[in-house]
């Protein structure tokens, strides 16, 4: 294959990672933005979503697409409810003290991983792709499912954006983000907003997981890399800025695709980490974040 | 009518208010005066349920003492906080929308409120933190009026404003009297108090020390001097 098509392939692979990363990171960013806490268990929610998707897909009879669709519909709300429960039972009692929340979510991360290890086991397992359409380009064939992942992630992100900017729940979330005390003085039940935000953030990780599992393997440790990349994305984009998160996910996803294909995946991680260091030194609020 | 009995409030282990008794009657302006740090803002926050509080808070016969903050507002107590505390990155319209949502008020209330503040009508799409100081204060009051409140708490609404803006706010407050709202106004400026107050509550040593009728206070400069040090 000559250089041009090779680059195209790399960019397409990068676009797929960017789309999934954008979903994942927007959940982390949303939680940080509204609640001012860092959710270290975000990758573990992703993993939990993937394990549940594997379970659901394996237990629904009929062609793979049916099981996968059922998973897409029920897994994100389930993971969201789990996260909301954690918020009410744990984070609220810690009064959202930033350091305490970090420690608590590290604990949660280990609990979720161990539960997955005990129930799902140590092996990596596949989930059948819901459909096996191949898009035949002049130079190479490409997975139609992966392109569908890009479109689906785009649609979900658009929905999140519409919820944030056009709905009452979004307005309430933004007001709470600005000033939770004054929000309460205007009848906003901040406890409920926090539970909803934490649940929504985890549900986004779960959506990313259900979309991704047919292209990879489910494993109880699969949350680590996405967590790291989400942190990198959110730091580069600016904590709490949805737009920044999207742009940063595109930069990281596309460069990851290109660098991994032409050089090595490790190099792309090294470069991303260096980029974070540069951003932290020269623009600590991120590319799009408001100055603190 | 809002009635407070035996109210105390504290931040952690520090008790700021003790044994406060106060009444705010519908159609009247009750002014709260007292030195910096005496606890005026804390009293407003205690009424809203935003600080740890004890004692009885009764609104038109309903006991609000045990309610969480967000439900206090839903019962019809609206706050114009000291320093305005708008939702800065949100637009004027969105700030008003938050107020309207509190008590499920709609278009009609929105229009009424904007009729009181025509300058806000022209700026509905503007991000509120880019408004001038006076416009921000108008928005803070407008946002509170969107609740159609039974009780309106204003914490130093004239702080840092020029005289014409203060006069505009005074007109709005005087206009509200006829609607039966019980207004509680924290105010440091004696002249402003004299123009609107039906009753004045003087605070000292973390409590309401004395309540006097507004009429007749004009001649009573020593009273002001004792509590506000003018
Ligand atoms: N969040 C807080 N934590 C601890 N102490 C506080 C807090 N807020 C206020 N205080 C203390 O409570 C006391 C009363 O403060 P408050 O703001 O109610 O006074 P104020 O009468 O409104 O003053 P000002 O006229 O300056 O607005 C002060 O001694 C203040 O230091
Ligand atoms: Mg004050």
Image (tube, coloured by chain):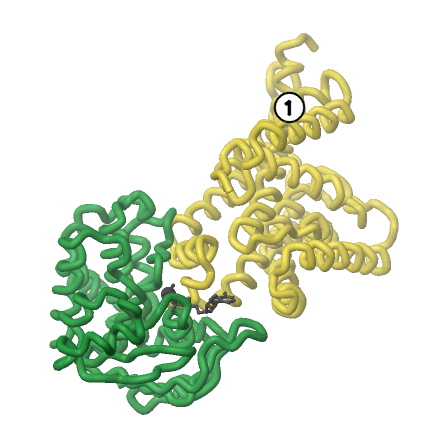
Chain colours: A yellow, B green
Mark 1 residue element: helix
Q: Position of residue A238 (x, y in %)?
A: 54, 38
Q: Position of residue A24 (x, y in %)?
A: 62, 44
A231 horizontally vs B9: left or right: right
**Residue B155: quarter of image:** bottom left
Q: Dot 1 surroundings within 10 Å: few (below 14), some, or many (20 or more)?
A: many
Q: Quadrant of ligand 1?
A: bottom left
Furthest-bottom residue in this view: B61
> Vertically, is A280 above or below A81?
above
Q: Position of residue B107 (x, y in %)?
A: 21, 62
Q: Chain of mark 1?
A: A
- Report which residue position mark 1 lands on: A255
Residue A60 in view of the camera: no
**Residue A139: quarter of image:** top right
* Residue occupying image coordinates x 26% and y 71%: B185
B55 horizontally vs A57: left or right: left
> Vertically, is B65 above or below A70?
below
* Residue occupying image coordinates x 35% and y 89%: B62
In depth, the one of A279 and A81 nearer the eye is: A279
The mark tally for this picture is 1
In depth, the one of A14 and A86 nearer the eye is: A86
* Residue occupying image coordinates x 71% and y 56%: A105
**Residue B110: quarter of image:** bottom left
> Vertically, is B32 above or below A157?
below
Quarter in which the N terminus of chain A is drawn: top right
Q: Position of residue B209 (x, y in %)?
A: 34, 83
A138 horizontally vs B176: left or right: right
In depth, the one of A279 and A266 nearer the eye is: A279
> Vertically, is B158 above or below A63?
below
B59 horizontally vs A70: left or right: left
């Amino acid at each position: 294959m000559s250089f041009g098509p090779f680059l195209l392939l790399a960019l397409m692979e990068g676009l797929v990672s960017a789309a999934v990363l954008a979903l994942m990171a927007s959940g982390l960013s949303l939680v940080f933005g509204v609640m001012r806490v860092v959710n270290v268990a975000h990758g573990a929610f992703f993993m939990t979503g993937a394990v549940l998707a594997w379970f659901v897909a394996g237990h629904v009879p009929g062609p793979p697409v049916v099981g996968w669709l059922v998973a897409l519909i029920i897994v994100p709300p389930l993971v969201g409810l789990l996260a909301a429960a954690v918020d009410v039972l744990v984070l609220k009692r810690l009064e959202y003290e930033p350091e305490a929340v970090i420690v608590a979510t590290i604990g949660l991360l280990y609990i979720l991983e161990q539960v997955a290890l005990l129930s799902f086991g140590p092996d990596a397992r596949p989930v059948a792709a819901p459909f096996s359409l191949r898009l035949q380009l002049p130079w190479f064939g490409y997975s139609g499912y992966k392109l569908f992942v890009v479109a689906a992630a785009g649609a979900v992100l658009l929905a999140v954006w519409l919820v944030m900017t056009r709905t009452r729940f979004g307005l309430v979330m933004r007001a709470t983000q600005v000033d939770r005390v004054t929000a309460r003085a205007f009848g906003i039940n901040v406890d409920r907003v926090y539970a909803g935000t934490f649940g929504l953030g985890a549900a986004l990780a779960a959506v990313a997981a259900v979309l991704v599992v047919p292209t990879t393997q489910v494993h109880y440790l699969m949350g680590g890399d996405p967590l790291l990349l989400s942190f990198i994305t959110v730091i580069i984009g600016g904590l709490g800025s949805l737009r920044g998160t999207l742009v940063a996910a595109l930069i990281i996803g596309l460069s990851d695709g290109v660098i991994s294909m032409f050089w090595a995946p490790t190099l792309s991680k090294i470069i991303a980490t260096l980029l974070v260091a540069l951003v932290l030194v020269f623009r600590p609020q991120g590319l799009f974040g408001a100055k603190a | 009518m809002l009635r407070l009995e035996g109210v105390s409030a504290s931040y952690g282990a520090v008790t700021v208010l003790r044994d406060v008794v106060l009444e705010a009657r519908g159609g009247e302006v009750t002014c709260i005066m007292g030195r910096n740090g005496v606890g005026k803002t804390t009293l407003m926050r205690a009424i809203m349920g935003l600080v740890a509080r004890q004692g009885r808070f009764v609104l038109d016969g309903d006991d609000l003492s045990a309610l969480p903050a967000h439900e206090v507002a839903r019962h019809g107590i609206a706050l114009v906080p000291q320093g305005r505390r708008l939702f800065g990155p949100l637009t004027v319209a969105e700030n008003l929308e938050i107020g309207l949502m509190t008590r499920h008020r709609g278009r009609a209330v929105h229009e009424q409120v904007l009729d009181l503040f025509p300058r806000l009508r022209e700026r509905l799409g503007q991000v509120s933190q880019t408004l001038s100081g006076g416009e921000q204060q108008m928005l803070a009051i407008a946002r509170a009026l969107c609740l159609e409140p039974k009780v309106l708490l204003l914490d130093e609404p004239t702080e840092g404003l020029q005289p014409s803006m203060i006069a505009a706010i005074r007109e709005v407050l005087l206009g509200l009297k006829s609607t039966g709202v019980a207004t509680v106004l924290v105010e440091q400026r004696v002249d402003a108090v004299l123009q609107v107050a039906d009753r004045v509550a003087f605070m000292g040593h973390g409590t309401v020390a004395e309540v006097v009728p507004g009429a007749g206070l004009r001649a009573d400069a020593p009273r002001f001097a004792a509590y506000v040090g003018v």
